[in-house]
């Protein structure tokens, strides 16, 4: 199935764009969802994380303290590399299974993979086209700070770990400008959805 990759930095508005694609009946597989699934209690990845970082990385109910882990890995690049080597192959397998299911349970002629690290990882190999949600970095920081419990400093560290705005846009086949209103973003999604339908029909 023709698959589009949807990406953008933290606070760029990927989720809002993805919601609009879902409105049109597109199966949008969320890489963040897959990342949560692979570290659920009882999964081998969570056991490995607890063994590596200690039981303090777990909440009282035995689930992963994601905020604590995020701070640990973004404060220590070597730990981030360790975590990525553990989880990225597992996340990829979960994504492939969900994209494969699109053929059986969705009627739309294309699927979408929403991922903040689409370009930075081998996830880009799973898509035939890349759509980037873009906005100026200061707007990105302001929106992410307003939405998340993380400090501006923590969000800046996450932004540094991701591709720069220029690098991300250079890899894009399509760009959605999210510097304006939600209505403006949704109108752009409506338009590009029609383009993706045409591409899918001619494959």
Image (tube, rainbow, N blue to C red):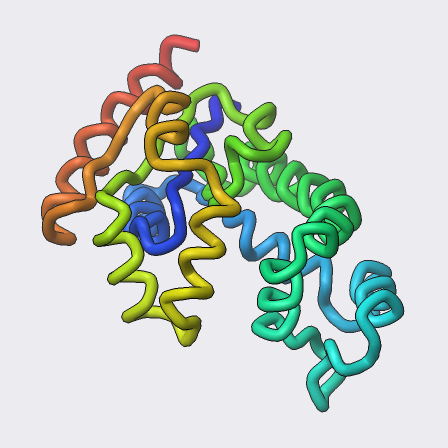
User: Would residue 34 appear left or right of 149 to someone viewing this image?
Assistant: right
Q: How many marks?
A: 0
Of the pair 156 and 61, the residue shown nearer to us: 156
Residue found at the far bottom of this picture: 60
Residue 109 versus residue 61 in the image, above or below: above
- For residue 152, which quarter of the picture? bottom left
Q: Residue at x 19, y 38 (%)?
A: 177
**Image quadrant containing the C terminus:** top left
Which of the pair 17/153 is nearer the observer? 153
44 horizontally vs 162: left or right? right
Q: Position of residue 121 (x, y in %)?
A: 61, 34
Q: Place residue 195 in its image quadrant.
A: top left
User: Where is 41 relative to 13, above or below?
Assistant: below
Q: Tell me which residue sits at (43%, 29%) in the image.
A: 4
Give coordinates of residue 32: x percent, y percent. Answer: 54, 54
Q: Residue at x 39, y 31 (%)?
A: 168
Give residue 70's position: percent from left, percent from top. Answer: 59, 65
Query: In front: 13, or 96?
Result: 13
- At 65% across and 76% down in the image, what residue appears? 65
Residue 143 position within the rendered picture, expressed as x and y whole percent measured from the top left: 26, 61
């Amino acid at each position: 199935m023709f698959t589009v990759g949807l990406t953008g930095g933290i606070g760029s508005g990927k989720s809002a764009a993805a919601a609009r694609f879902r409105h049109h009946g597109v199966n949008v597989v969320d890489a963040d969802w897959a990342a949560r699934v692979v570290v659920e209690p009882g999964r081998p990845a969570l056991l490995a994380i607890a063994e590596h970082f200690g039981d303090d990385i777990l909440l009282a109910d035995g689930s992963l303290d994601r905020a604590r882990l995020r701070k640990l890995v973004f404060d220590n690049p070597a730990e981030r590399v360790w975590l990525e080597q553990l989880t990225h192959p597992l996340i990829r397998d979960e994504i492939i299974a969900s994209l494969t299911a699109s053929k059986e349970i969705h009627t739309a002629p294309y699927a979408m993979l929403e991922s903040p690290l689409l370009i930075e990882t081998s996830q880009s190999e799973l898509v035939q086209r890349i759509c980037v949600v873009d906005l100026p970095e200061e707007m990105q920081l302001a929106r992410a700070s307003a939405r998340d419990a993380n400090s501006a400093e923590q969000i800046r560290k996450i932004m540094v770990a991701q591709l720069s705005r220029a690098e991300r846009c250079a890899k894009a086949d399509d760009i959605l400008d999210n510097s304006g209103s939600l209505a403006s973003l949704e109108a752009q999604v409506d338009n590009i959805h029609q383009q993706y339908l045409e591409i899918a029909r001619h494959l």
